[in-house]
Image (cartoon, rainbow, N blue to C red):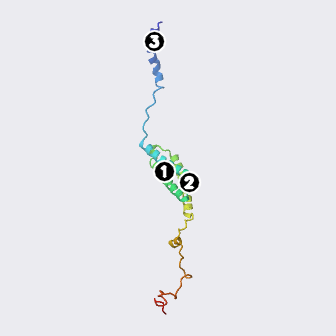
Amino acid sequence: MSLRRAVLIAACAFPVALGPAAGQFQPAPAQQEMPPCIKEFVALRTDAQKKAQAIQAASEKKVPPTEACKLFNSFSAAEDKLIKFAQENTVWCGIPPNVVEDMKKSHVRTVGIRTQVCQAAAAAPRRPPGPSLSDALSAPIPNSGNIKTGRGTFDTLTGTPLGGR
């Protein structure tokens, strides 16, 4: 058999042999765009994750309780939005009910921690007020011990304005 004849037979036989196997090796379908509900869910989840990371960074920096309270309020609101969206779109987006329940349990823990942090921020000692103007100028503060009455030229309460009695 000549080389030409072998190539021709192989060329004719290859498509026949490839037919059943071609179904197994079909090219992957092109990436489909995510449905709008999944896009919105991912956006809300990403927002909540960013706010959670901000809380972690703040705890490493040892921020004051007032700042931590603000961060927890922000995170709690983002988590609440995510849960409401998941509840409203469970069927449409195909979100399993147990995921929504887990999110609710996590949110309850978040609210508990937020309450503790914000109570600690409210109970934190307030900064004492700054010095008054007289303190800053080192002037004495008038009180009953350093006020002289009845002996002065301009004492109009107990005498004449010119010092006579």
Image spot of residue 143 (x, y percent): 54, 80
Q: Is residue 61 above or below residue 3?
A: below
Q: Which residue is mark 1?
A: 83
Q: CA distance from mark 2 to mark 3?
A: 72 Å
Image spot of residue 65 (x, y percent): 55, 58
At label 1, counting other C-alpha atoms closer than 10 Å, the crowd grade (few under 14, some 14-19, many 20 or more) is many
Which label's residue is closer to the chain start, 1 or 3? 3
Residue 7 is tagged as 3
Q: Which residue is mark 2?
A: 109
Q: Nearer the viewer, residue 21 or 42?
A: 42
Mark 1 or 3: the one toward you: 3
Q: Secondary structure at mark 3?
A: helix
Examine the rendering and report whether any part of residue 105 can be seen. no
Q: Secondary structure at mark 1?
A: helix
Q: CA distance from mark 1 to mark 3?
A: 65 Å
Which label's residue is closer to the chain start, 2 or 3? 3
Q: Amino acid at mark 2?
A: Arg
Q: Amino acid at mark 3?
A: Val
Q: Is residue 143 above or below residue 17?
A: below
Image spot of residue 156 (x, y percent): 47, 88
Residue 126 is tagged as none
